[in-house]
Structures are given as structure tokens and as C-alpha cells.
Image (cartoon, rainbow, N blue to C red):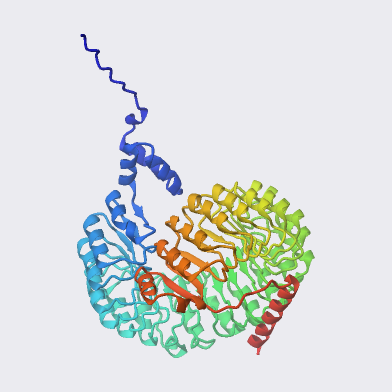
Amino acid sequence: MVKKSRVVDWEFNPFDLLSDEILFDILDYLDHNPFDKKSFSLVCKDFYRVESRHRRVLKPLRSELLIRAIDRYPSVERLDLSSCPRITDDSLAAISNAYKFCLRSIDLSRSRFFSNAGVSNVVVNCKFLVEIDLSNATELTDSGAVAISKASNLEKLWLARCKLITDIGIARIGIGCRKLKLINLTWCLGVGDLGVDFVAVKCKEIRSFDLSYTTITNKCLPSILNLQYLEELTLVGCLGIGDEGLATLEKGRTSLKTLNLTNCDNVTLWGLPYLTSRVTCLSHLNLTNGSVVTEAIANSLQNLPKLQSIKLDGCHVTCSGLEAIGNRCILLRELSLSKCSGVTDEGLSFLVKKQKELRKLDITCCRKITQISVDNVTKSCTSLTSLKMESCYLISKEAFTLIGERCHHLEEIDLTDTEVDDAGLMSISRCKKLSSLRLGICYNLTDNSLIQVGKICRELVELDLYRSMGITDLSIAAIASGCPRLEMITLAYCKDITDTSLVSLSKCSRLSVVEIRGCSSISSAGISTIALGCKQLTVLDVKKCHNVDDAGLLPLTNFSRSLRQINLSYCSITDVGLLALANIACLQSMTVLHLKGLSADGLVAALLACSGLRKVKLHASFKSLFPQPFLEHMESRGCLFQWRDKPVQDGVDPWVWRHTARMNANIMYLLDEV
């Protein structure tokens, strides 16, 4: 018997001709979309291997996936653990062993359960580390700071809310980390003048210094302002900084460009001129919630010839103050007057006539301005890219047409709670570069103008139609078909929105945030279409969508693998639907208030199964029904419970709701004026 020769069936694979370097170049082009990278790695074993070697940035979404991720990706330079609430010393030991020669940056800003020893392990082993974010490490002490000081190559360090670290620990960091360029000590209540002064003397290369809500006083200002390369100084809520210290400052050699004095109550119109005369390179100045902005303060800004951005949010601004800003700040590009009492047509009109190169203007809640201001703003500042005018409801409908006629470069506009109508929005739709459009509580709008937006504004990324009652499925269909870049849409309490809108939006493949709370005609069928079409969905709010039940959650568990935040309050969800959410590995935040079909046992089972949860909002009545060991177990996993005791809320007539909201806002405005 003659044996038949065995025929080897070999098929040529053209991918074998591609070198790793070429595949690396291809992966570089896929950086913006993780789904594309995942598809690439599934082509074949070689592509899987190359993608693993190419990955330089790693952000595990759950703590228990960390070890497996470390094994797969050996060349990580930046490790972001901000989505992993439970990181132990053992986890940090595994990281330091695996990435000993490549790790340059690690973010532990939202992680807990590690100690000073774990931090020391990473610092000692990872010699090339240049960035560490330890914000919110509330158990970190001076011993941990001593460990950090061994990172001699460190350039950026975040220690926000590390309240146990004192001047001694900060001084040790100053001695060991001489290459620091950025340091953030926000809410480090144990840090004062001594530690800050020491760091300023030892770390000569600091570019960015954040000392917000620390106990520093005027004593350390001279050493800070003498930092030769300092560009950004943030002193939010530093009550120890005051006029007396500013008056004694000598002219520094600082190259300071950005200064934030928000909520510095003791810096007044008397001390500010001393400061501006000593930091003459400033381009960005933030005086939010500060002193009254008078002509004297505004005149002091003439000492800042390079000033381009001023934030005066929450300040009382006089008419003469605005006029002085217009005269003195010749290079102004950004001006924020949000919630500033005292802003009138006279002052604002004078200012904008002098500032023809203004790019960004925020006049949110400036409730005294009228069409006169809009006329002058649009006539003088034709290069505006951002205009925010929420709650400016004295501005007449006719004024909004001027915006579209004159400001063609707008990329962002906020018209929330204004009287804009279809004619005004149609005019604004001429701005073809528009990417962010906020139209919440705009009761004069109908489908006619939104359809026009959909036809022209193809760059639109963000659309907010919160409580805009005249909107129906027709306009959403136009937006969905005409705005392929759409990523965020808010349709909350738009009463005429139905599942048809969700069918239209399911064609927007980039959509990641969908808020449809209070849309009573939305059902599980609509949620299913969104789940099938929008694979990048990360936030879903269906609060008070009473027709959404368990059937709507099942497609989410199969197709919305990136979902991180969901609000199911007042829906018709039962224990079964909630338990199904456990299949979404990325889910981190859940709000489940007033679900009639939910039992305590079912809720416990669902929460235990959703192992990635970090925040859960529940009605306070459940707290006494949960076993104490369960609560302790959830806390040990890094999950935070937020208990709410709100009664069941019925729907409110939209006109009554807006009238009440405006009346309350006016009362607060009048109180601020007193």
C-alpha cells in the first residue's frame, strides 16, 4: 500500500512583510480611538504582540485588572490609576518591578489603601520617574514625603489634600527633588511659610506653584516671586496673603505669567497696585470673588502691558472700573464678568469699543445688560470665538440676530435662559465653526431653527437643550444627520422627545454623553437603539423616564462596554435589570433613587456584582436595611455611598419652574448688591 504524501496547505500572509516599526507607525495614527486599537490587536497574534509593545499609556478601569494589564503591556511610560480606587502596597510593588526602567509618570490621585512604604517602593525602583500625582492621599505623612524626596529626577508633583504632610516633609522634598518644575500643595493644611520658603529656595526651576487653601502668609511671598522661571502661581483661598505683605514686596525677577488670587479676601484695592507693579510680565490674572473693581484697581493694570486675560467673576464691578479696563488693557483677549454685579450697558459698551481683538467674553448672569450691550459687543468684537451670556434675560429677541450677522468666528456660545427665538438662532447658525451650543431653558425656540443648525453647523460637538420645550424629534433628526462629530447632547425635560430621537442619535457614532431625564415618552426601545449604535457611550441619564425598564438595560450590558455613569432614578427598573449591569466592567457611578421595583436584597446583590463601582447614590431608607459587613466590604473596595433623603418629586409646570428660578436668582443678586 502506497502512502499518500501529506500536502501542507500554506497560505501567504501579506502582513508578514510589515516590520514592527511600520506597525508602530500605523498604531500612532490610531491613538485617538481605543476601539480601533483593540480591533488592530485582534487581527492576529503578531498584531497583538506589536500592540502590546507599542502601548506607552495605560489606564486600567478596575483594580483587579491591573496585574493582567502589567503582564500584557511591558513598555508603559505613563500609568494612570485614577480609575482604580483600591491600590495596595502589593500593587505598587508589582508596578515598580515591571516598569523599573520605563515608567516616567504615575497617577494615584483617586486611589487609596497604599501606604508610605508603597510610595517608597515605586520611587526607589523607578529611577526615571518624572511625574507623581498623589492628590487625595490623606494617609500620606512626612515619612511618605521623605520617600518622595529620593526621586531625584522628579519634575512634577501633586500633593493636593495630603493634609498630614507638614513643613518638615515639604522641606525634605525640596532638598531631594531639585529638578521640580511643578508642585501642587492645595489643601495641605500642615504646610506653611517655612516649608514653602524652603522649596522656593532649593527648587530653582519651578514653573508652576499651587498653594491654594494653605496656611501661608505674606512672609513667603518674596522667595516665591524671586523664582526665576516661575510662570504660574495659584493662591486660591490663601487668607494669610494680604495688602500689608504686598506693600513691602521688592520688585522681583520673576517671569510670572499667570496669577490666581480667587477668594483672597485680604487682597483689596489698596494692595493690588503694589503687586501689579512687581509682576509686570503677567498675561493671565484671576481675581474671582475679590474686592470691588474700581477705577483705581483697573488703573493699576496698566503696569501689566502683556495682560491678555482677566477673570473678575463674582466681583462688584463699577462702571468707571470697566472703562478703566478698556483704556488700560490694550492686549486683552479674554474677559470674564460672570455673576458680576454692577455691570451695565454703559460700562460694558465703553470697554468693548476699546477691545476690538477680544476673543472670549463671559457675561453670565449680568442681569442689567440689554440689547445695547449686544449691539456694541458684536459691532466691536467681530473676532469673538466664545460668548457666554446665560441668564441675561433683559436682552430682547432682536439682539440675537446681531450675533450671527457680525461674529462669524464663534466656536462656543451659551444662551441658556435667554429670550433667543428662531430668528436669532437661525442667524447664529451662520457660524460654521460652532462646536458648543447651549440653549437650555430657551422657551422661544422651535424645530425650525434647530433644523437650520443641523444643516450648517457640521462641527458641533456639544448641544444642550435642557428644558427647551419647543423641540421635537424633527430637529433632533436634523442634528443627528448633519452633525457627525456630536459627542454630548442634553434633552432633559424636553416633553415632546420620543424614541424616534434616540433612533436618529444612534447614528452618531461618537456620542458619549446622553442626558434625557424627564422625557416621559422615552422607552426601553429607544435606549436599546442608543446602546446598539453608540458604542462610545460613557454617561447616560434617564432619570424620570418611567417607561424605561429592565428590557432597556439588557442591550446596554451587551453593547455599551464603555459606560461609566448611569442615573436610573424614578425608572421602572427591578432587581433583575440592576443585576444585569454587572456585565459592564467600566461602570463606576450609579444613581438609583425611588425605584419601586427594587428590594434591599436585590440591591445588595447588584452592588456586589458591579465590582468597579466607586460612587453610589441611594435613598437613606436603604442604609438601615443593609448589613454592616456589606457596607464595610464595599468601602474596602473603594466605593463611596451618598445617602439622599429627598421625597418623591412630581413634575412642575415649566413656566412656573422658570419664573421661580429667576425670582430666586434675582433675590440673590439683590443681596449681593447690598
For residue 105, above or below residue 601: above
Number of numbered callouts drawn: 0
Q: Is residue 365 visible?
A: yes
Q: Is residue 332 visible?
A: no
Residue nearest the viewer, comparing 276 with 217: 217
Q: Is residue 294 left or right of residue 93?
A: right
Residue nearest the viewer, comparing 600 with 47: 600
The residue lying at 64 percent from left, 48 percent from top is: 504
Looking at the picture, how far across and down is residue 62, in whole percent?
A: 37, 60
Q: Is residue 194 left or right of residue 230?
A: left
* Quadrant into which the N terminus falls: top left
Looking at the picture, how far across and down is residue 216, in whole percent?
A: 38, 85
Residue lying at the far top of the rendered structure: 1
Image-quadrant location for residue 606: bottom left
For residue 432, above or below residue 622: above
Image-quadrant location for residue 627: bottom left
* Quadrant into which the C terminus falls: bottom right
The residue lying at 48 percent from left, 88 percent from top is: 266
Looking at the picture, how far across and down is residue 101, in whole percent?
A: 22, 55
For residue 97, above or below residue 366: above
Q: Is residue 138 left or right of residue 621?
A: left
Residue nearest the viewer, comparing 429 with 343: 429
Residue nearest the viewer, comparing 486 with 538: 538
Looking at the picture, how far across and down is residue 433, in whole percent?
A: 62, 52
Image-quadrant location for residue 311: bottom right
